[in-house]
Image: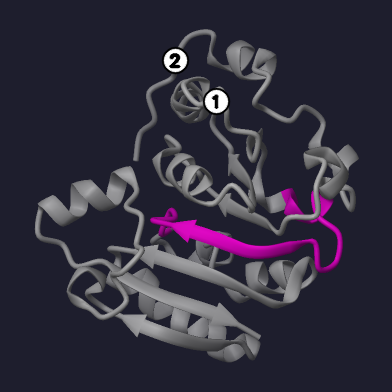
Amino acid sequence: MRLRNISGSREQVAESRFVVQEPECHKGAWKEFFGNEHPLHIEIGTGKGKFLTALSTLNPDINYLGIEKYSSVLLRALQKREEMEECRNLYFLRFDAEEILNLFDRGEVARIYLNFSDPWPKDRHAKRRLTSKEYLKRYDQFLAADGAVIFKSDNRGLFDFTLEQAKEAGWRTSEITYDLHRSEYIQGNIMTEYEEKFSALGNPIHRVILTR
């Protein structure tokens, strides 16, 4: 997908009070950053922020970090965040997920959300997929022992790849559905922008929970 560059977005993101600057400095100390002992949930590839802004409002006793690589996309999430003045449990990072081990210490994250991740369709790019066994190995180093990765996608090829990679990496899969909106697991589901778009087109949404 071609991303439209927004002039000045990098500077606006760098100046936002809702973006954690130099987040590597908080590795192992995110509870101190938030000022409480609440569990930490992260979304990798947070996009325009609809999913996390909704979750953080519904769950004030959970801390949330949205990780997004592109300033032009993150800027849209920050516009939503600006409207949530009373919110104290949601911040964003402009960061490349390839370096995610620099952000979190062992057991520091309770849940990882992966929503409509880039499928990287070419075989030679398989390691870049956020549900590849290479990324699962990374998550294993900072996900809590009872933590989970929750993955949603409309891409059947990527979803099947995810199930295969989880098996190869020794992870367990549960609540597998190939049509989330018609399944028993729809209760409590928060839709992302992509999910709304694809669902409106009649595309089934796939979802799985990965644990160790």
From the viewer's perspective, is 179 left or right of 113?
Answer: left
Q: Which is more toward the observer, 172 or 175?
A: 175
| Residues tagged 1 and 2 counted as in contact (Cβ below 8 A) | yes
Residue 73 falls within the magenta-colored stretch: no
Where residue 14 appears, as percent x and y from the top left, is: 68, 17
Marks 1 and 2, the one that precedes in the sequence: 2
Q: Which is more toward the observer, 186 or 98?
A: 186
Looking at the rendering, which quadrant does residue 65 occupy? Answer: top right
Type of amino acid at the residue the image marks with label 1: Ser
Instruction: Tell me the quadrant of the picture where the C terminus can be found.
Output: bottom right
Q: Residue at x 56, y 70 (%)?
A: 149
Q: Residue at x 49, y 42 (%)?
A: 57
Instruction: Tell me the quadrant of the picture where the N terminus can be found.
Output: top left
Where residue 139 appears, as percent x and y from the top left, is: 70, 68
Q: What span is colored magenta in the figure?
A: 99-119
Looking at the rendering, which quadrant does residue 132 occupy? Answer: bottom right
From the viewer's perspective, is 129 left or right of 193?
Answer: right
Where residue 94 appears, as percent x and y from the top left, is: 64, 33
When the figure is inspected, residue 10 is found, relative to residue 101, above or below; the finding is: above
**Element at label 1:** helix
State the residue position of label 2: 6
Measure how far apart labels 1 and 2 are at the Cα level. 8 Å
As drawn, the residue found furthest toward the top would be 8
**Element at label 2:** loop
Q: Which mark is residue 27?
A: none
State the residue position of label 1: 71
From the viewer's perspective, is 118 left or right of 17?
Answer: left
Type of amino acid at the residue the image marks with label 2: Ile
When the figure is inspected, residue 16 is found, relative to residue 46, above or below; the finding is: above
Q: Residue at x 64, y 35 (%)?
A: 91
When the figure is inspected, residue 6 is found, relative to residue 42, above or below; the finding is: above
